[in-house]
Image (cartoon, grey):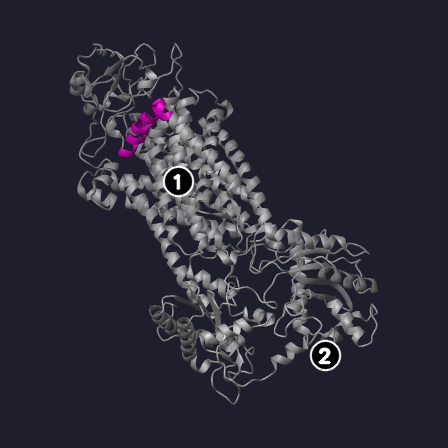
Amino acid sequence: RKTSTCYPTSPPHICSIRAAVMVNMDAKGETQPSDVDGLQVDGLSNRNLTTAATSDIMGPLGLGVGFGKAGDAKAGEGPEEKGYYDPAGDLEGADAPRMENEMAETAAAPVPGSPESEVEKVGGCFGGFIWLVVTYPFVLFVLVPLLAFLIIGPVGIPPYPAFIEGNRARNSLGARQFDAYTAASDDWLDQVSGNSFATSSFENQEFAPYTQEVFGQSINVWFESESGTILSEKNVASQLKILSGFSTIVGPFCQQASETDPTCKLPASIFSTTGTTTSEGVKAALTAASDVEKDRWKAFLGANTDFSGGTGFWTKSRVRVGGPLPGYKNASHLEDEQAAVYEAEYKRPGFTGLPTPDGWIAQMDELVDAEAKANPDLKVRYASFPMIGPVFFQALLGDALLSIGALFAVGIIIWVQVGSVMIAVCSMFQIVIAFVLTLSTWRLIGNESFTFIQVLVIFIILGIGADDVFVFMDAWKQSRTQPNKVSGSLHGRLQWTWARAFAAMLVTTTTTIGALCLTSIIDVPSIATFGTFAAIVVFWNFFFCVVWLPCVVIIHEKYVVRGCNDGCCAKRTCGCCCSLCTSQWGLEEGAKPAHGSEDELRGLEKFFKYTLFNFLMTPAKRYSVFATFVTLAVVGIALASTGVHLTDKSLTESFLKDSSDIQQMFNLLTGNSQAFSATSDGRKRAGHIVYGIDKRNPIDRSGTYALGEGDQIGEPLFRAEADLNSAAFQTHLVETCDLIKELPSVARRVADKSPESLCFMSDFKAYREAKGASFPTSPDTLVADLMAWRGDWCTHAGCYHNRQGTGVSDLDDNYDLNTGFLVEGDRIKFAYVSGNLTIPYLEQELSVIEPEYDEWTELGNKQNKDGFEPFGMTDRSDWIMLMHTLINGVVSGVPVALCVAGGVLVLATGNVWVSLVATMTIVGVMSCFFITFVATKGKLGYYECMFLQITVGMSVDYVVHLAHSYNQSPRYHRHEKMQDSLGEMGISVFSGAITTLAASGLLFGCQFNIFFQYGSFIFFVILWSILWAMIFFPALMIQCGPNGRSGDIKPIRWLHKQVCMGMGDDHPAPPPPADGKDGAVVREPSDVVSVQAEQ
């Protein structure tokens, strides 16, 4: 065997070898044997050459091929600096043979299509599968989807829950205590509503039509002044005009002044409260207001209003909608029926379900738009609860269209990349069917429902599914240019393609599933199930790619591509007559290129195998890559440690983007806006001291389903030994209430500065003492005495009905929500007392609310005496437990996921050093992701922590493909192996990344925050993944990757050979050069041509 090297100055008949290597084709497009046997050219049998062509290239048979002479190297330019390959070490400065160590046949290949050829090619444990696919492709093409539908049909899919469920921590002690309290207090409220004299009496009361205000239907209007002059003369006139116009639109449905006066009541506003409709009059009233009035007027004025100067940014008003409707007793009578009538007036929906011009919403929009033009300084927002549905539906419809656009974008990219409409459609079908099949699998393994966030898995599988399709299709196209043993028949091509693609997809699927399944350890059901659900989708996608996609490809090859070289065939194949598509299937005029020629490579393959590779072969450029990426990783780690902060927003505050008018309107309507501060008797959080529940084992969750509608939390477990009727407990509870009043976190009333404690036992004691009765009362009559207290309409201290003892307004249900007792027979089994908190209702920052929580838990521990075992908590306990769980999950889960990914990489590659470098790359991806996270001002919240759990699983695919391909390369030197990896997998990895980036990029336009955040997470993780995988990883492998089989784990490599159907026998690792020197590969495909000949 001798090697001939061609230089630009070499004779034309040597340098034109690749142009002369052609495949003989008969009329049907089948390859035919030539007359010359025994000659090997570039690893291809001479069956591909005519006798004349062989003579032209090699000269007369039996003569040796001439040798080219090595050029002289310039001073200071060694082989590594110039990027040359010098296996013997004695051709310094010589250009290298491109295909050194490529597979070469030493004997004549069997005639393509012959029985002995088929038998040889279909070997290994999966040979029967390959034979079935090639021989009878329609069998599995029909059978696999049919079996999927047979599973989906009988099993069905789980019902979609009405709300986002399972979004709370579940197993920590604090979370279980909070859920036990929630369940017990809900039972108390149910008991109150069932036994309340006031409630049952009110339900039977009758009112004249439209004389009650229906608060759920009334229209809240918020006015914002951009200049901060909300009470200027012009702005006051605009506000009054809007309120009058809204009242006119509501018309006969407004609340009437009285049964005898049908005029509409004035809207509740700062104007009706102060009794003036002029700017000067309102400012004067604010200046003269008492502290109590100022506190009450906070309901209508923004939080930053200056009472002395009359300046501010916000006001709030309410247009009163009246009830009951004619034919109903009162506003609560058959409430759902009445609500449907109001809702119809709001939107009067047409065929699409969207508001029509004659509805209240459309008329109000028209009035607001007209006033906005007349007064640009004033911005008007309005909403009521019946309006939320239509408004959110419009936003969701827009986001849904963008999501569908992502699906189409992926389909188009697959079409362009594979060059076939048929394969693109089938690829999208298998991605979608994998998701639907997962829903049925999800139900089959016992899950009653799936959550909204699980729907987002479709965007993960779009990227992974497209990536797997590209891996398979690129391998199939490359098989066309392999030696005759592979390319001579469909059996050989499919075996070679399937073996390579199966191994590559198995590696990435295993690592991705492993990383995703780690989310199951997170103590938040929706996150834990999200990762598991995604892992099942990835598995089914892998199944379709290795079982069904080969059938699609063979059908396409047999019945669409083969035997056609005209424009008609190209149109059927590609869906268009573009050269981009037709060239991918060899439909242009001419036969297949010779194995190893530059003509066999597509543009991107040339770029990755030569342009990018040669860039990285230059030491100075390679070292600059190391410096750049290491610096980025260090910056990312530093930012992850110091620049990442926790969110201070609840889930309801982050449905849509902060800049969304709809989200701002929703926050205003639900009281979750910082624009207004709460009044003293308004919405507040509370701290609680809870008695009767087992503080160590507080709840029984058996029979519950964490993702079920209503978030089934379980049944509280009560302490049987706790005697909450005893005189000792009555005295003990009053003592606890006195201690609550002393807590710094408890709010004070504006009128008398008294603490806002809520304690039924203290009020009961004051009631008894005012009536001259004893306290504590008899344990046997305690429940009866408490019920008598609640039903007594009295006026002295401690009375429940007039709330004189509690200081809570008659219109507020805060008392029963925050203090009460649950009875069983004549015994109290659960009791709790509370205090309203000073920290604003909307505050969620852990550094602010945790000291408050600690104060209440400390009081609970202090009162753990006299045989009673209370525990303290606040209304924010569930948020605190959730955030701690998510933080712990990220802090521990990401490193564990990296370790798991590293372990899976060892099993996947069978090489310690390759897996170590790949794991370092994944760490770099995660580090750099935090640069963009901090740069975009991201904060760790529920969605962010959930998405961080799966970033490791999403960042492994690309580097794993390259690492696996590197280790499968038959060449010896590290740079040769890396060049093979870039040439084989570069285009697949890049195409998969472009597909995922395109799909996730469309989500940036979504209004719903979960879509936007999800899209940004995927986009930046994939962006950093492709940069690290395609630049840093190859550079590091060229610098210090293992040569040959260094670092191989032999048992794993043996297993790989078995899985790959014996293909490993065709890829022996050559011994190192005699002197042990490393070399490099050529810089450009046109510079050098290598000819290996056997004489």
Is the N terminus in the top left, top right, bottom left or bottom right quadrant? top left
| Magenta-drawn segment | 603-622
Q: Position of residue 301 (x, y in %)?
A: 51, 68
Q: Dividing the image into 4 quarters, which one contains the C terminus?
A: top left
Q: Give residue 479's quadrant in the image.
A: top left
Find residue 1023 and name its label: 1
Which label's residue is closer to the chain start, 1 or 2?
2
Does the segment drawn in magenta span residue 607? yes
- Looking at the image, can residue 123 be seen? no
Secondary structure type for disc 1: helix
The mark closer to the camera, 1 or 2, is 2
Residue closer to the observer: 346 or 146: 346
Name the residue type under label 1.
Leu
Report which residue position mark 2 lands on. Answer: 795
**Label 2 Cα neighbours within 10 Å, binned few <14 / some 14-19 / many ≥20:** some
Residue 206 x, y percent position in the rendering: 58, 84
> Can the viewer see residue 249?
yes
From the viewer's perspective, tell me whether residue 392 is left or right of residue 688: left
As displayed, is residue 579 above or below residue 1056?
below
Q: Quadrant of residue 979?
A: top left
Magenta-colored segment: predominant secondary structure: helix
